[in-house]
Structures are given as C-alpha cells and as structure tokens.
Amino acid sequence: MISAGRPPRPLRRWEASRYLKDSFGIDAAVSTLAKYACLGGGPEFYKAGRQPLYPIDRLDEWALARRGELVRSTSEDRRG
C-alpha cells in the first residue's frame, strides 16, 4: 500500500520489464535490462544487495527518451 506523499516502491527487474511493455509498448526483456545494467544505456537503478531496483520515474524518463518524436510518415523519421 502506498501512503500519501510517498513515492511508489521501485520495481524489480522483471516488474520493470512488464511495466515498460504495459505502459509504453517497449519490449525490454529481463535479459536486455540485465545487459543494459552491465554495459550502460538502460534506465537508472538502485542496488539492494544483488537486487537491482528501478524507480518508476526513471523508467518513465528512459522510455520517453527512447520512444522518439511523433512522425506522420517514415520519410519524416530522422533517426535512421
């Protein structure tokens, strides 16, 4: 249960993977998040012992940055 004024608890890696899919349509498998944790490029996380914990606000920021801008056609897509 979340109390007033308290941010939601950080998510475990499998929960973060599901959250990204459900909230943003981004397929980031648990193994992909683990790879990002080693190599960089993924969402920021805390370490609680061996367990990575992903704050929801950081998942949101990462997903929004990754998603890109709206386009009307593929010819407008400047990413590549």
Image: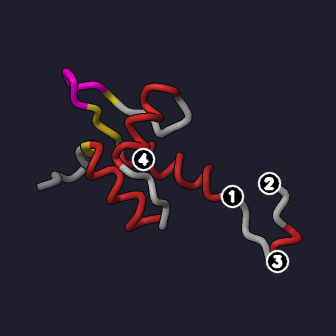
The residue wearing badge 3 is 73
Q: Amino acid at mark 4?
A: Asp
Dot 2: few (<14), some (14–19), or many (≥20) neighbours within 10 Å?
A: few
Residues drawn in magenta: 47-51
Residue 48 highlighted magenta (yes or no): yes
Q: Which mark is residue 60?
A: none
Q: Of residues 56 and 67, which is closer to you in this image?
A: 67
Q: Nearer the viewer, mark 2 or mark 4?
A: 2
Residue at 79% over, 54% down? 79
Within-10-Å neighbours for mark 4: few <14, some 14–19, many 20+: some
Looking at the rendered structure, the kind of residue marked 3 is Ser
Question: Which quadrant of the figure contains the N terminus?
Answer: bottom left
Q: Which mark is residue 79?
A: 2
The prevailing secondary structure element of the residues shown in magenta is strand
Q: Earlier in the sequence, mark 3 or mark 1?
A: 1
Give x and y (percent) for residue 3. Answer: 16, 52
Q: Please, is residue 24 above or below residue 37 in the view?
A: below
Q: Which mark is residue 57?
A: 4
Q: Amino acid at mark 1?
A: Gly
Q: Are marks 3 and 4 in contact (CB under 8 Å)?
A: no
Residue drawn at x 19%, y 21% as measured from the top left: 49
The image's mark for residue 68 is 1
Tell us which disc is closer to us: 3 or 4.
Answer: 3
Image point 44% across, 52% down: which residue?
Answer: 28
